[in-house]
Amino acid sequence: MPRIAFVNGRYVPHNDACVHIEDRGFQFADGVYEVVACINGKLADERGHLDRLERSLSELSIDMPVTRRSLQFIIREMLRRNRLKNANVYIQVTRGVAKRDFPFPHDVPASIVLTARAFQFDGNVKVQKGGEAITVPDIRWKRRDIKSTGLLAQVLAKQEAAESGAYEAWMVDDEGYITEGSSSNAWIVTKEGKLVTRPASTDILRGVTRTALEKICAELQMKIEERPFTVQEAYDAEEAFNTSAVALVVPITKIDGHVIGSGAPGPVARKLYGEYRAYAAGERGEPVAWVADLQEVA
Ligand code: PMP
Protein backbone atom coordinates (compact mmCIF):
# COMPACT_ATOMS: atom_id res chain seq x y z
CA MET A 1 0.00 0.00 0.00
CA PRO A 2 1.65 3.31 -1.04
CA ARG A 3 1.94 6.11 1.47
CA ILE A 4 -0.46 8.93 0.59
CA ALA A 5 -0.03 12.71 0.88
CA PHE A 6 -2.59 15.47 0.34
CA VAL A 7 -1.48 18.32 -1.94
CA ASN A 8 -3.81 21.18 -2.86
CA GLY A 9 -7.00 19.17 -3.12
CA ARG A 10 -5.61 15.82 -4.26
CA TYR A 11 -4.54 12.64 -2.51
CA VAL A 12 -1.33 11.53 -4.21
CA PRO A 13 1.34 8.86 -3.62
CA HIS A 14 3.80 10.33 -1.11
CA ASN A 15 6.78 9.68 -3.41
CA ASP A 16 5.23 11.72 -6.23
CA ALA A 17 3.90 14.55 -4.06
CA CYS A 18 5.40 17.92 -5.09
CA VAL A 19 4.83 21.63 -4.77
CA HIS A 20 5.73 24.24 -7.38
CA ILE A 21 9.24 25.75 -7.29
CA GLU A 22 7.64 29.21 -7.00
CA ASP A 23 5.68 28.23 -3.93
CA ARG A 24 6.33 30.94 -1.34
CA GLY A 25 6.83 28.27 1.28
CA PHE A 26 9.87 27.11 -0.67
CA GLN A 27 11.08 30.58 -1.69
CA PHE A 28 10.53 32.50 1.57
CA ALA A 29 9.33 30.05 4.25
CA ASP A 30 6.15 32.14 3.90
CA GLY A 31 3.87 29.68 5.60
CA VAL A 32 2.85 27.98 8.81
CA TYR A 33 2.30 24.45 10.01
CA GLU A 34 0.71 22.28 12.65
CA VAL A 35 1.21 18.75 13.88
CA VAL A 36 -1.64 16.74 15.35
CA ALA A 37 -1.02 13.43 17.05
CA CYS A 38 -3.36 10.52 16.54
CA ILE A 39 -3.04 8.18 19.51
CA ASN A 40 -4.75 4.80 19.28
CA GLY A 41 -7.12 6.15 16.62
CA LYS A 42 -8.03 9.33 18.51
CA LEU A 43 -6.82 12.78 17.52
CA ALA A 44 -5.21 14.48 20.50
CA ASP A 45 -6.17 18.10 21.01
CA GLU A 46 -7.31 18.55 17.41
CA ARG A 47 -9.33 21.60 18.33
CA GLY A 48 -6.36 23.30 19.98
CA HIS A 49 -4.12 22.67 16.99
CA LEU A 50 -6.67 23.94 14.50
CA ASP A 51 -7.28 27.02 16.66
CA ARG A 52 -3.55 27.73 16.66
CA LEU A 53 -3.29 27.10 12.91
CA GLU A 54 -6.00 29.69 12.29
CA ARG A 55 -4.28 32.16 14.57
CA SER A 56 -0.85 31.68 12.93
CA LEU A 57 -2.47 32.22 9.51
CA SER A 58 -4.37 35.28 10.61
CA GLU A 59 -1.23 36.87 12.11
CA LEU A 60 0.32 36.56 8.62
CA SER A 61 -2.85 37.50 6.67
CA ILE A 62 -2.94 34.17 4.85
CA ASP A 63 -6.45 32.92 4.06
CA MET A 64 -7.06 29.28 4.91
CA PRO A 65 -7.67 27.53 1.57
CA VAL A 66 -10.24 25.08 3.02
CA THR A 67 -12.85 25.33 5.77
CA ARG A 68 -12.16 23.86 9.19
CA ARG A 69 -14.74 21.15 8.55
CA SER A 70 -13.03 20.20 5.30
CA LEU A 71 -9.64 20.14 7.00
CA GLN A 72 -11.01 17.89 9.73
CA PHE A 73 -12.29 15.56 7.02
CA ILE A 74 -8.92 15.59 5.19
CA ILE A 75 -7.03 14.78 8.40
CA ARG A 76 -9.27 11.75 8.97
CA GLU A 77 -9.06 10.73 5.34
CA MET A 78 -5.25 10.87 5.53
CA LEU A 79 -5.30 8.52 8.51
CA ARG A 80 -7.77 6.21 6.77
CA ARG A 81 -5.94 6.11 3.44
CA ASN A 82 -2.60 5.53 5.16
CA ARG A 83 -4.19 2.98 7.51
CA LEU A 84 -2.74 4.69 10.56
CA LYS A 85 -4.00 4.66 14.13
CA ASN A 86 -0.83 5.96 15.76
CA ALA A 87 0.66 8.79 13.77
CA ASN A 88 1.57 12.43 13.55
CA VAL A 89 -0.30 14.39 10.91
CA TYR A 90 1.57 17.41 9.52
CA ILE A 91 -0.43 20.27 8.00
CA GLN A 92 1.46 22.92 6.04
CA VAL A 93 -0.15 26.04 4.62
CA THR A 94 1.80 28.60 2.57
CA ARG A 95 0.90 31.87 0.87
CA GLY A 96 0.78 30.02 -2.43
CA VAL A 97 2.53 30.07 -5.80
CA ALA A 98 3.53 33.41 -7.33
CA LYS A 99 6.37 35.01 -9.26
CA ARG A 100 9.17 35.64 -6.77
CA ASP A 101 8.64 39.02 -5.15
CA PHE A 102 8.62 39.92 -1.45
CA PRO A 103 5.23 41.66 -1.01
CA PHE A 104 2.09 39.53 -0.83
CA PRO A 105 0.79 38.42 -4.22
CA HIS A 106 -2.83 39.23 -5.11
CA ASP A 107 -5.59 36.67 -5.72
CA VAL A 108 -3.35 33.68 -5.14
CA PRO A 109 -4.84 30.76 -3.19
CA ALA A 110 -2.82 29.42 -0.28
CA SER A 111 -1.16 26.04 -0.77
CA ILE A 112 -2.00 23.22 1.59
CA VAL A 113 -0.10 19.98 2.12
CA LEU A 114 -0.77 17.18 4.59
CA THR A 115 1.48 14.25 5.36
CA ALA A 116 1.05 11.52 7.95
CA ARG A 117 3.78 9.56 9.63
CA ALA A 118 3.43 6.48 11.80
CA PHE A 119 4.52 7.01 15.38
CA GLN A 120 4.46 4.56 18.25
CA PHE A 121 3.42 6.51 21.36
CA ASP A 122 3.35 3.46 23.64
CA GLY A 123 6.79 2.32 24.65
CA ASN A 124 8.53 5.48 23.48
CA VAL A 125 12.05 4.94 24.83
CA LYS A 126 12.59 8.67 25.37
CA VAL A 127 9.55 8.84 27.62
CA GLN A 128 10.66 5.81 29.61
CA LYS A 129 14.36 6.55 29.93
CA GLY A 130 14.43 10.31 29.42
CA GLY A 131 16.72 12.23 27.12
CA GLU A 132 19.59 14.67 27.37
CA ALA A 133 19.46 18.33 26.42
CA ILE A 134 22.07 20.92 25.61
CA THR A 135 21.60 24.69 25.75
CA VAL A 136 22.15 26.92 22.71
CA PRO A 137 21.61 30.64 22.10
CA ASP A 138 18.10 31.39 20.85
CA ILE A 139 18.82 33.06 17.50
CA ARG A 140 15.22 33.07 16.19
CA TRP A 141 13.05 35.97 15.07
CA LYS A 142 10.80 37.84 17.52
CA ARG A 143 7.43 36.27 16.61
CA ARG A 144 7.95 32.79 17.98
CA ASP A 145 4.24 32.61 18.84
CA ILE A 146 3.58 32.03 15.11
CA LYS A 147 4.18 28.42 14.09
CA SER A 148 6.21 29.40 11.03
CA THR A 149 7.76 26.89 8.65
CA GLY A 150 10.92 29.04 8.93
CA LEU A 151 12.73 26.59 11.19
CA LEU A 152 16.37 27.18 10.32
CA ALA A 153 17.40 28.19 13.86
CA GLN A 154 15.75 25.02 15.16
CA VAL A 155 17.46 22.91 12.49
CA LEU A 156 20.85 24.25 13.63
CA ALA A 157 19.96 23.76 17.30
CA LYS A 158 18.80 20.17 16.76
CA GLN A 159 21.90 19.40 14.71
CA GLU A 160 24.11 20.66 17.51
CA ALA A 161 22.15 18.51 19.95
CA ALA A 162 22.48 15.47 17.68
CA GLU A 163 26.22 16.01 17.29
CA SER A 164 26.67 16.06 21.06
CA GLY A 165 24.51 12.97 21.51
CA ALA A 166 21.63 14.93 23.03
CA TYR A 167 17.94 14.64 22.25
CA GLU A 168 16.82 18.26 22.49
CA ALA A 169 18.33 21.75 22.50
CA TRP A 170 17.00 24.22 25.05
CA MET A 171 17.29 27.71 23.64
CA VAL A 172 18.53 30.60 25.78
CA ASP A 173 17.62 34.28 25.36
CA ASP A 174 20.09 37.18 25.57
CA GLU A 175 19.46 37.55 29.32
CA GLY A 176 20.35 33.93 30.05
CA TYR A 177 16.80 32.61 30.47
CA ILE A 178 15.56 29.47 28.76
CA THR A 179 12.91 30.23 26.16
CA GLU A 180 11.90 26.69 25.09
CA GLY A 181 13.14 23.55 23.39
CA SER A 182 13.83 23.63 19.66
CA SER A 183 10.60 21.69 19.08
CA SER A 184 9.03 21.61 22.52
CA ASN A 185 8.21 23.68 25.58
CA ALA A 186 10.62 23.49 28.50
CA TRP A 187 9.65 22.87 32.13
CA ILE A 188 11.50 22.35 35.39
CA VAL A 189 10.52 21.20 38.87
CA THR A 190 12.59 23.03 41.49
CA LYS A 191 14.12 21.37 44.56
CA GLU A 192 11.22 22.96 46.49
CA GLY A 193 8.79 21.07 44.24
CA LYS A 194 7.63 24.07 42.18
CA LEU A 195 6.61 23.45 38.58
CA VAL A 196 8.05 26.25 36.42
CA THR A 197 7.64 27.10 32.74
CA ARG A 198 8.07 30.29 30.76
CA PRO A 199 4.89 32.39 30.32
CA ALA A 200 3.23 32.40 26.91
CA SER A 201 4.31 35.48 24.96
CA THR A 202 5.80 36.25 21.57
CA ASP A 203 9.08 34.77 22.96
CA ILE A 204 7.85 31.17 22.67
CA LEU A 205 5.39 29.01 20.83
CA ARG A 206 2.40 28.52 23.11
CA GLY A 207 2.30 24.74 23.00
CA VAL A 208 -1.07 23.09 22.73
CA THR A 209 0.27 20.32 24.98
CA ARG A 210 1.45 23.00 27.42
CA THR A 211 -2.01 24.60 27.42
CA ALA A 212 -3.66 21.23 28.10
CA LEU A 213 -1.23 20.59 30.97
CA GLU A 214 -2.11 23.97 32.45
CA LYS A 215 -5.71 22.84 32.66
CA ILE A 216 -4.80 19.39 33.96
CA CYS A 217 -2.50 20.87 36.62
CA ALA A 218 -5.24 23.27 37.72
CA GLU A 219 -7.60 20.31 38.13
CA LEU A 220 -4.98 18.42 40.11
CA GLN A 221 -4.24 21.53 42.18
CA MET A 222 -0.64 21.47 41.04
CA LYS A 223 0.46 25.09 40.88
CA ILE A 224 2.46 26.22 37.85
CA GLU A 225 4.81 29.15 38.29
CA GLU A 226 4.86 30.86 34.91
CA ARG A 227 8.12 32.77 34.82
CA PRO A 228 11.38 32.69 32.91
CA PHE A 229 14.05 30.50 34.51
CA THR A 230 17.82 30.56 34.03
CA VAL A 231 20.15 27.87 32.75
CA GLN A 232 21.60 27.56 36.27
CA GLU A 233 18.11 26.97 37.70
CA ALA A 234 17.64 24.23 35.15
CA TYR A 235 20.94 22.58 36.15
CA ASP A 236 19.87 22.76 39.81
CA ALA A 237 16.34 21.46 39.18
CA GLU A 238 14.92 18.31 40.69
CA GLU A 239 13.29 17.45 37.35
CA ALA A 240 13.20 18.82 33.84
CA PHE A 241 10.96 17.85 30.95
CA ASN A 242 9.72 18.87 27.52
CA THR A 243 6.20 18.91 26.16
CA SER A 244 5.07 18.67 22.55
CA ALA A 245 2.31 17.13 20.47
CA VAL A 246 4.76 14.69 18.90
CA ALA A 247 6.53 13.42 22.01
CA LEU A 248 3.96 14.41 24.70
CA VAL A 249 5.96 14.65 27.96
CA VAL A 250 9.65 13.71 27.77
CA PRO A 251 11.82 13.76 30.90
CA ILE A 252 15.21 15.45 30.52
CA THR A 253 17.79 13.74 32.69
CA LYS A 254 20.90 15.77 31.81
CA ILE A 255 21.43 19.33 30.62
CA ASP A 256 24.87 20.30 29.25
CA GLY A 257 26.22 17.22 31.03
CA HIS A 258 24.73 18.23 34.43
CA VAL A 259 22.69 15.41 35.91
CA ILE A 260 19.18 16.60 36.76
CA GLY A 261 17.84 15.36 40.10
CA SER A 262 18.34 11.63 40.40
CA GLY A 263 19.33 11.33 36.73
CA ALA A 264 16.21 9.27 36.00
CA PRO A 265 12.73 10.38 34.86
CA GLY A 266 11.07 11.98 37.88
CA PRO A 267 7.61 11.48 39.41
CA VAL A 268 6.15 14.79 38.21
CA ALA A 269 7.04 14.19 34.53
CA ARG A 270 5.77 10.62 34.77
CA LYS A 271 2.53 11.71 36.37
CA LEU A 272 1.92 14.45 33.81
CA TYR A 273 2.61 12.03 30.98
CA GLY A 274 -0.06 9.67 32.33
CA GLU A 275 -2.50 12.50 32.90
CA TYR A 276 -1.93 13.89 29.41
CA ARG A 277 -2.49 10.46 27.87
CA ALA A 278 -5.78 10.16 29.75
CA TYR A 279 -6.78 13.63 28.57
CA ALA A 280 -5.82 12.84 24.96
CA ALA A 281 -7.85 9.64 25.15
CA GLY A 282 -10.91 11.72 26.09
CA GLU A 283 -11.01 10.53 29.68
CA ARG A 284 -11.10 14.08 31.03
CA GLY A 285 -14.02 15.46 29.06
CA GLU A 286 -13.87 18.01 26.25
CA PRO A 287 -10.36 19.08 25.24
CA VAL A 288 -9.58 22.71 26.00
CA ALA A 289 -9.50 25.24 23.21
CA TRP A 290 -6.17 26.85 22.55
CA VAL A 291 -6.16 30.36 24.00
CA ALA A 292 -5.39 32.51 20.99
CA ASP A 293 -5.30 35.90 22.61
CA LEU A 294 -1.73 36.95 23.30
CA GLN A 295 -2.48 40.64 23.62
CA GLU A 296 -1.99 40.62 27.35
CA VAL A 297 1.55 39.30 27.00
CA ALA A 298 2.79 40.49 23.60
N1 PMP B 1 7.87 25.11 20.93
C1 PMP B 1 8.33 24.87 19.69
C2 PMP B 1 9.40 25.75 19.13
C3 PMP B 1 7.80 23.81 18.93
O1 PMP B 1 8.23 23.58 17.68
C4 PMP B 1 6.81 22.98 19.51
C5 PMP B 1 6.27 21.81 18.75
N2 PMP B 1 5.34 22.17 17.81
C6 PMP B 1 6.36 23.28 20.80
C7 PMP B 1 6.91 24.35 21.48
C8 PMP B 1 5.29 22.45 21.46
O2 PMP B 1 4.02 22.76 20.94
P1 PMP B 1 2.85 21.68 20.89
O3 PMP B 1 2.67 21.19 22.29
O4 PMP B 1 1.68 22.43 20.42
O5 PMP B 1 3.30 20.62 19.96
Image (cartoon, grey):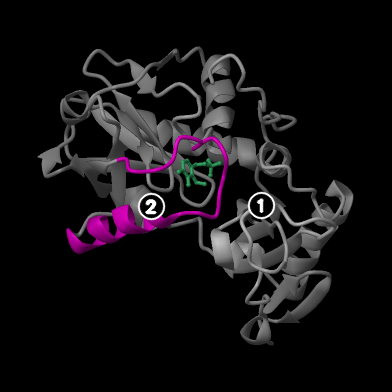
Region of the chain picked out in magenta, as a range: 138-164
Q: Position of residue 223 (x, y in %)?
A: 44, 12
Q: Is residue 87 visible?
A: no
Magenta stretch: residue 161 in it?
yes
Residue that numbered label 1 is attached to: 103
SS for dot 2: helix
**Picture coordinates of residue 239, whole percent (x, y):** 27, 30
Quadrant location, the N terminus: bottom right
- Residue type, numbered disc 1: Pro
The residue nearer to you, when weighing 238 against 171, is: 171
Q: Nearer the viewer, mark 2 or mark 1?
A: 1
User: Horizontal placement of 32 versus 191: left or right?
Assistant: right
Q: Residue at x 57, y 40 (%)?
A: 146
Q: Which residue is mark 2?
A: 154
Query: Under tag 1, what secondary structure?
Result: loop
Q: Position of residue 230 (x, y in %)?
A: 23, 24
In this rendered view, identify the residue nearer to me: 200 or 96: 96
Answer yes or no: disc 2 within 8 Å of ligand 1: yes
Callout 1 crowding tier (Cα within 10 Å): few <14, some 14–19, many ≥20: few
Residue at 70% from the left image edge and 33% from the top image edge: 287
